[in-house]
Image (tube, rainbow, N blue to C red):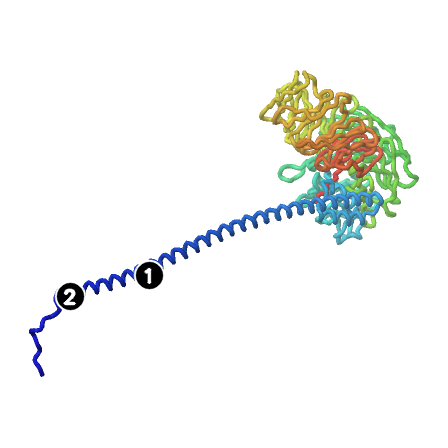
């Protein structure tokens, strides 16, 4: 083996440098190639990203454009749908309106079932504002008093509450007596209360029953005993005297105030008994000492704060300590008599044989008496009484009744059994008999004209107002009738009515409806539903006065007092006429002119309940203005109306034409209904209610149902 040669030289530095440079060139070349590749790849990726970005931007723009186009299309479709829905709603309402108009024709033809079917279809489609009128005209008039377990027990007497919402009857089961209280409108039995200690009464006994204003309490006199019940608790009032005689001491009549807190009983030879309910629930009974020789009280009523009695010698007003004042003398004791305090006068019915004498007595220091006579049927008399609406009624043993006033009488047969109870019902006559039946005889006039509230005494002048009636008696005494209560105001010039009560000016003081006084001067021209009043003050100013403030408004017209003035029943809006110009005041700004015709002065005006529509009559042409817009409708009546009113949001015009009450649809001028032939005055008292003077009666017509 040869020895390694150490002397051999390695590569020279130059060679090494060249080799290193070659290696570096290779590395740098490779690195450059890598960089170029990376750059090329990056550039390619960048360009691709830019393209994708641009594509994305283009897609976003396209998507935005498509979204905007879709939104526009959606808005267009929505508008079209809204238009279609509006057109559909208008079409449905128009169809409902036509169905209601057709139903009115069915009502006129007596086809109430078909009218009800049409009304039901209209209710689903969207009925017109006056649909409640049609609902009332088509409602089922049959009322059946049911639910009693003692329906076969004789009815001995009955009573109606002052607000006509409840009715009660006394039944004799043979073992005990009970009082049943019913819902008057629907006939449902509400409660039954049993009387303990009352023996079976003779067949000819005439127990007397009273209900308070809302029917929540009753008072009964029967068989020498008296009872009072409230909240389900029955208490005995007073005691039967030891020498009680069922003939001589029978309670002939009973009368009380609206709350049954003071009760007067006419007890024959025992005279006049006053029973007072104390705050602890107990009763104080006392005999009123009349300053008459051996008084035999045949009938009694409470006339305001004082009782009026009938004795065999005359009709007397009873003052303090039993001091009496003769109102009308009697030649002989009547066989039957009845007494009732009505609207400003005591009403008296006296029967001798077949001759019945009616009297109206204005109870004052100088009584004013009006009399008339009626002949009764030739049969035995069962009873003689006054109903809650002041109607005198003769009841015969055969079930016949004769109702009358001071000019006319009407006879009808209510079943074939002896009647023990007859009253006015919201739908006609309600009666009970000895067989145990309690039934209603409907009256078409009640459905069309409403329910009588009070008889208008002869020679009294009545004026219906939005919140009650005003009555002027002979001698210019003024009475106000509100909520079934009569209030005498004496000799005042004018009065305005609000729901809270009357307003009047006396002795320089302005009496506000809430009972407070004001010293504001002016002429009283109206009262609003909130209890504030409107005054006219010279020379050209309106004052709006309430209990705490006074606001004044400038009235155009050069100091001329407005005449007439009408007020909305449920809003603070007034319409005034000055010459031939009509102004409306909303109590926010000065009165604004609405209409006027230089050649014809409007003689009648009416506002709807909310003061949004104003009707002005120019003879037989009535122009109805919509006060919030320039819309105007015209209705032409058959003859020039005596009075007008607006109901149901101004959609119905009520016109009084020659004794007939006529209702027109404002939008078309079509006649909806004619009712009555003896209506002499009317006034809107709400959105769907009227107060009327019809046939010498004060009538409330509720066209809007409670549903």
Give x and y (percent) for residue 474: 79, 23
Image quarter where the N terminus lies is bottom left
Kindly identify the residue that appears in the image at 36 percent across and 56 percent down. 43
Kindly identify the residue that appears in the image at 16 percent across and 63 percent down. 17
**Residue nearest the observer in this picture, 530 or 206:** 530
Q: Secondary structure at mark 2?
A: helix
- The answer to which quarter of the image holds residue 316 is top right
Q: Tell me if mark 2 has few (under 14), some (14-19) or many (20+) residues whose alpha carbon lies within 10 angstroms of its own.
A: few
Q: Secondary structure at mark 1?
A: helix
- Of all residues shown, which one is farthest toward the bottom? 1
Real-space Cα separation, disc 1 to disc 2, in angstroms: 31 Å
**Residue nearest the observer in this picture, 693 or 301:** 693
Give x and y (percent) for residue 540: 65, 18
Drawn side of residue 530 relative to residue 61, left or right: right
Drawn side of residue 592 relative to residue 104, left or right: left
Numbered disc total: 2
The answer to the question of whether label 1 and label 2 lie on touching residues, with beta carbons closer than 8 A, is no
The residue indicated by pointer 2 is 16
The residue indicated by pointer 1 is 37
């Amino acid at each position: 083996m040869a020895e390694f040669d150490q002397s051999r030289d390695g590569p020279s530095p130059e060679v090494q440098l060249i080799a290193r440079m070659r290696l570096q060139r290779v590395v740098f070349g490779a690195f450059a190639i890598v960089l170029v590749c990376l750059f090329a790849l990056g550039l390619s990726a960048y360009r691709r990203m830019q393209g994708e970005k641009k594509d994305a931007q283009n897609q976003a723009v396209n998507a935005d454009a498509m979204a905007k186009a879709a939104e526009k299309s959606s808005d267009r479709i929505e508008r079209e749908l809204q238009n279609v829905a509006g057109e559909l709603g208008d079409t449905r309402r128009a169809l409902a309106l036509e169905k209601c108009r057709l139903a009115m024709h069915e009502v006129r033809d007596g086809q109430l079932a078909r009218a009800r079917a049409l009304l039901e279809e209209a209710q689903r489609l969207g009925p017109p504002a006056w649909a409640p009128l049609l609902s009332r005209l088509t409602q089922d008039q049959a009322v059946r008093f049911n639910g009693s377990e003692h329906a076969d027990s004789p009815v001995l007497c009955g009573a109606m509450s002052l607000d006509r919402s409840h009715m009660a009857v006394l039944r004799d089961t043979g073992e005990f007596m009970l009082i049943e209280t019913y819902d008057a409108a629907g006939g449902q039995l509400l409660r039954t209360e049993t009387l303990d200690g009352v023996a079976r009464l003779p067949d000819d006994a005439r127990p007397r029953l009273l209900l308070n204003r809302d029917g929540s309490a009753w008072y009964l006199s029967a068989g020498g005993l008296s009872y009072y019940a409230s909240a389900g608790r029955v208490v005995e009032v007073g005691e039967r005297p030891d020498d009680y005689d069922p003939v001589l001491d029978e309670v002939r009549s009973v009368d009380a105030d609206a709350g049954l807190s003071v009760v007067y009983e006419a007890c024959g030879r025992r005279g006049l008994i006053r029973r007072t309910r104390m705050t602890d629930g107990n009763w104080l009974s006392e005999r009123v000492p009349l300053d008459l020789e051996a008084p035999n009280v045949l009938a009694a009523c409470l006339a305001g704060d004082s009782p009026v009695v009938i004795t065999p010698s005359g009709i007397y007003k009873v003052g303090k300590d039993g001091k009496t004042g003769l109102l009308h003398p009697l030649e002989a004791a009547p066989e039957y008599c009845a007494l009732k305090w009505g609207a400003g006068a005591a009403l008296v019915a006296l029967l001798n044989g077949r001759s019945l004498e009616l009297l109206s007595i204005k109870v004052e220091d100088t009584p004013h008496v009006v009399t008339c006579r009626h002949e009764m049927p030739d049969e035995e008399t069962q009873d003689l009484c006054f109903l809650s609406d002041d109607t005198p009624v003769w009841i015969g043993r055969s079930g016949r009744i004769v109702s009358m006033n001071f000019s006319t009488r009407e006879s009808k047969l209510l079943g074939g059994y002896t009647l023990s109870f007859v009253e006015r019902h919201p739908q006609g006559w309600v009666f009970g008999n000895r067989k145990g039946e309690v039934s209603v005889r409907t009256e078409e006039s009640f459905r069309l004209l409403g329910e009588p509230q009070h008889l208008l005494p002869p020679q009294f002048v009545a004026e219906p107002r939005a919140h009650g009636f005003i009555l002027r008696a002979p001698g210019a005494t003024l009475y106000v009738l509100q909520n079934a209560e009569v209030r005498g105001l004496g000799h005042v010039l004018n009065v305005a009515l609000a729901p809270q009560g009357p307003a009047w000016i006396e002795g320089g003081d302005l009496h506000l409806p809430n009972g407070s006084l004001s010293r504001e001067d002016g002429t009283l021209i109206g009262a609003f539903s909130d209890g504030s009043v409107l005054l006219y003050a010279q020379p050209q100013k309106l004052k709006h006065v309430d209990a705490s403030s006074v606001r004044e408004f400038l009235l155009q017209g050069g100091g001329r007092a407005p005449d007439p003035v009408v007020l909305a029943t449920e809003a603070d809006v007034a319409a005034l006429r000055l010459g031939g110009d009509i102004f409306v005041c909303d109590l926010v700004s000065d009165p604004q002119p609405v209409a006027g015709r230089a050649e014809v002065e409007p003689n009648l005006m009416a506002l709807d309940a909310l003061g949004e529509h104003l009707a002005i009559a120019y003879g037989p042409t009535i122009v109805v203005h919509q006060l919030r817009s320039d819309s105007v409708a015209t209705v032409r009546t058959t003859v020039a109306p005596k009075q007008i009113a607006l109901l149901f949001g101004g959609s119905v015009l009520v016109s009084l034409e020659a004794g007939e009450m006529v209702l027109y649809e404002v939008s078309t001028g079509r006649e909806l209904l004619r009712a009555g032939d003896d209506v002499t005055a009317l006034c809107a008292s709400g959105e769907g209610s009227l107060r009327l003077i019809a046939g010498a009666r004060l009538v409330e017509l509720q066209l809007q149902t409670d549903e």
